[in-house]
Amino acid sequence: MQGGMRNAHGGRRTGLILALDSSDPAEARRWRDAAGDAAGIIKLGLEFTYANGFDAVRQLSADRALFLDLKLHDIPNTVGSAIRALAPVAPAMLTIHAGGGAAMIAAARAACEAAYPAGARPILLAVTVLTSFDAAALAETGVGEEPRRQVLRLGRLAMQSGADGLVCSPHEVAPLRDALGEAPCLVVPGVRPAGAEAGDQKRVMTPGETARAGADWIVVGRPITRAADPAAAARAIASELAAV
Ligand code: C5P
């Protein structure tokens, strides 16, 4: 699984990741099947995994590339061991918190290299500043930076320490590309098709806008899973991406 596909002109082709945010395996399976090939990767996170366990994760992703979004954050040895323990689940993408620091990120990368077959190791993605943080919430944790500056700081640290890419909001894509160039695989939630309800996502962009800004993958959940016709909604987003 490569991060960052290329189109026929050598440009970036942005892919669709379907977020299956449910604790119910039957519901998640319905959403997965409705989206079909429109979504190249399915994302399962803490909710599904804690509710159903890793056997259910493996069943749901048996014929799909899996983004396992567990946002690991612990001492380097524990994160490395956890990533090695996840090898039987064969994730195509994994998340860690960049705030875990350089040694933790390096340990995560080393575990990816050691425990997965060459050419099939997961894309290691770092989460920088959760979008639930504003400047005041960051200050409460002792971080005096504006969120945007902290995103760039942690993004740079993550890439220097062995991450393959970053999870970021649509509005962070262009600044991260300016600062870090083409190397990071940028995976972007908070995307809404024109006319869709924003829900609890505050600063959204459309799939086309996010692709043009330089995203490698967009992550979309409710605009597909809660649509009257999830299959049509997934196809429409995939077509919008293909047209960029
Ligand atoms: O339903 P929706 O399209 O908002 O889902 C987006 C997915 O991306 C969810 O799984 C959510 O947890 C995740 N996510 C997010 N915003 C972030 C990081 C992750 O919405 N900043």
Image: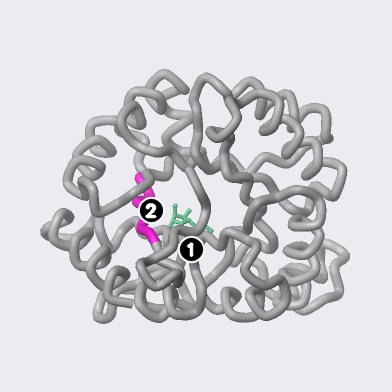
**Residue 234 placement: quadrant:** bottom left
Answer left or right for 37 relative to 70: left
Query: Under 8 Å from ligand 1: the CB of mark 2?
Result: no
**Magenta: main secondary structure:** strand
Of 129 and 237, nearer the camera is: 237
Asked if disc 1 and disc 2 are in contact, CB closer than 8 Å, the reply is: no
Q: Residue 28: x and y, percent?
A: 28, 38
Answer left or right for 147 relative to 153: left
Answer left or right for 139 relative to 54: right
**3D distance between C-alphas at marks 1 and 2:** 10 Å
Q: Residue 29: x and y, percent?
A: 24, 35
Of 168 and 201, nearer the camera is: 168
Residue range highlighted in magenta: 15-20
- Residue 17 higher or lower than 124, as above or below: below
Q: Residue at x 26, y 66 (%)?
A: 237
What residue type is disc 2 on? Ile
Here the colouring is one colour
Of 106 and 182, nearer the camera is: 182
Residue 67 belongs to magenta span? no
- Residue 22 higher or lower than 192, as above or below: above
Residue 17 belongs to magenta span? yes
**Residue 13 placement: quadrant:** bottom left
**Residue 131 placement: quadrant:** bottom right
| Helix, strand or loop under label 1 | loop
Q: Badge 2 is on which residue?
A: 17
Badge 2 local density, few (<14 within 10 Å), some, or many (20+)?
many
Q: Badge 1 is on which residue?
A: 216
Q: Residue 241: x and y, percent?
A: 32, 70
Name the disc covering residue 118, or none. none
Residue lying furthest front in this view? 9
